[in-house]
Image (cartoon, rainbow, N blue to C red):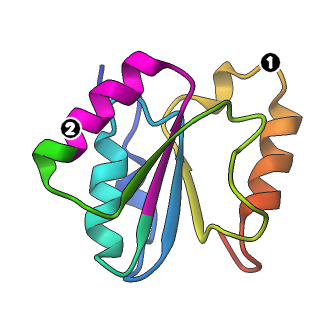
């Protein structure tokens, strides 16, 4: 599935930034983000399923990007420190959470001051 949008088309990503994709699935948006933030930036992909993480790892390897870090977890408890991310993106995943308040709180926690 291609999801229901293209968050990397509208997100302003700059060289050296850190981006987090919530519910990264097969990793397509993570790969696109990694290319946009360049070798001094980092793109994190967070997914809760081993199958999607394995697919994402294969896609990352085939794409040849080296600044991607894939994380296993849920979007209601993001496994990253506070104030560590410049940009959060997500493609049709937040709507699936039964606790959207927790997701939004976690996004606020991991975003750096001025993050988006």
- The answer to whether 104 appears left or right of 78 in the picture is right
- The answer to whether 47 appears left or right of 69 in the picture is right
> From the viewer's perspective, is residue 40 above or below residue 6?
below
> From the viewer's perspective, is residue 106 above or below residue 112?
above
Image quadrant in which the N terminus is located: top left
> From the viewer's perspective, is residue 105 above or below residue 57?
below
Task: Say if mark 2 contacts mark 1, CB within 8 Å.
Answer: no
Does label 2 or label 1 sit earlier along the sequence?
2
Q: Position of residue 44 (x, y in %)?
A: 48, 53
Residue at the image position 68 percent from the left and 55 percent from the top = 80
Question: What residue range appears in magenta?
Answer: 43-60
Q: Is residue 83 magenta?
A: no
Residue at the image position 33 percent from the left and 39 percent from the top = 27
Q: Position of residue 64 (x, y in %)?
A: 14, 55
Q: Determine whether the residue tagged by mark 1 lies in a helix, strand or loop.
A: loop
Q: Which residue is mark 1?
A: 98
Task: Name the quadrant containing residue 115.
Answer: bottom right
Residue 81 - label: none
Residue 100 visible somewhere in the drawing:
yes
Q: Which residue is mark 2?
A: 59
């Amino acid at each position: 599935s291609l999801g229901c949008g293209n968050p990397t088309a509208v997100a302003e990503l700059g060289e050296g930034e850190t981006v987090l994709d919530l519910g990264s699935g097969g990793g397509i948006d993570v790969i696109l983000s990694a290319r946009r933030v360049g070798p001094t930036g980092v793109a994190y992909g967070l997914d809760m399923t081993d199958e999607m993480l394995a697919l994402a790892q294969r896609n990352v390897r085939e794409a040849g990007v080296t600044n991607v870090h894939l994380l296993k977890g849920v979007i209601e408890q993001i496994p990253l420190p506070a104030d560590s991310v410049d940009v959060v993106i997500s493609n049709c995943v937040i709507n699936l959470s039964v606790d959207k308040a927790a997701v939004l709180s976690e996004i606020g926690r991991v975003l750096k001051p001025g993050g988006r």
